[in-house]
Image: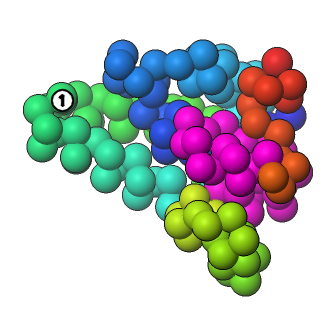
């Protein structure tokens, strides 16, 4: 079974101080099942990399390498979000619309969510979306 991948987990693969058991599990599971992400993941990952360049945590060469690595991974970008559901989830769970897009995809795909974002994780639990590593696929 596939899972929905968010940018927080993705970034944990490349920054040692952000490494986590959930991130490691997601990376291991990715090879077996692939993952899905809303198209905004593409932008969030690139934004996180540029922000980390500005902070001196990596340089442009490292960013290029990370993006090349990600291109080779089985991550499918979903462009079919239901805007009304995304807004309703954002309102109900007090999420950003960006985070609500991940939750909407997990609900629609009926698949676990991989996130390190605590507010998104709480919303997923409340919406009865399994979190990768909390009984789902583990």
Q: Which one is in front, 77 or 11?
A: 11
Label 1 belongs to which residue? 58
Q: Would residue 108 be seen by someone viewing this image from the given angle?
A: yes
Is residue 78 placed above or below 89 in the rendered structure?
above
In the image: residue 58, left or right of residue 93: left
> Which of the 4 quarters of the picture holds residue 102?
bottom right
**Displayed quadrant of residue 28:** top right
Q: Is residue 116 above or below residue 50?
A: above
Q: Residue at x 79, y 46 (%)?
A: 125
Q: Residues within 10 Å of mark 1 (few under 14, many from 20)?
A: some
**Position above or below: 53 against 110:** above
- In this rendering, the answer to whether 62 lies above or below 67 is above
The answer to whether residue 103 is magenta is yes
The quadrant of the image that shows the N terminus is top right
Measured from the top left, where is residue 109 in percent x and y?
Answer: 84, 54
Residue 10 or 123: which is nearer the viewer?
123
- Report the quarter where the C terminus lies: top right
**Span shown in magenta:** 102-125
Q: Who's the residue at 40% across and 58% down the image?
A: 43
Residue placed most toward the observer, 109 or 69? 109
> Measured from the top left, where is residue 135 in percent x and y?
86, 25
């Amino acid at each position: 079974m596939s899972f929905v991948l968010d940018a927080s987990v993705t970034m944990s693969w490349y920054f040692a101080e952000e490494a986590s058991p959930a991130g490691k599990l997601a990376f291991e599971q990715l090879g077996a099942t692939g993952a899905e992400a809303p198209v905004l993941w593409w932008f969030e990952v690139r934004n996180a990399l540029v922000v980390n360049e500005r902070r001196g945590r990596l340089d442009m060469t490292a960013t290029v390498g990370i993006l090349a690595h990600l291109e080779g991974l089985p991550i499918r970008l979903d462009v079919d979000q239901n805007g009304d559901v995304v807004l309703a989830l954002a309102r109900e769970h007090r999420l950003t619309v960006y985070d609500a897009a991940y939750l909407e995809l997990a609900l629609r795909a009926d698949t676990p969510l991989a996130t390190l974002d605590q507010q998104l994780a709480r919303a997923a639990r409340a919406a009865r979306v399994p979190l990768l590593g909390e009984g789902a696929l583990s």
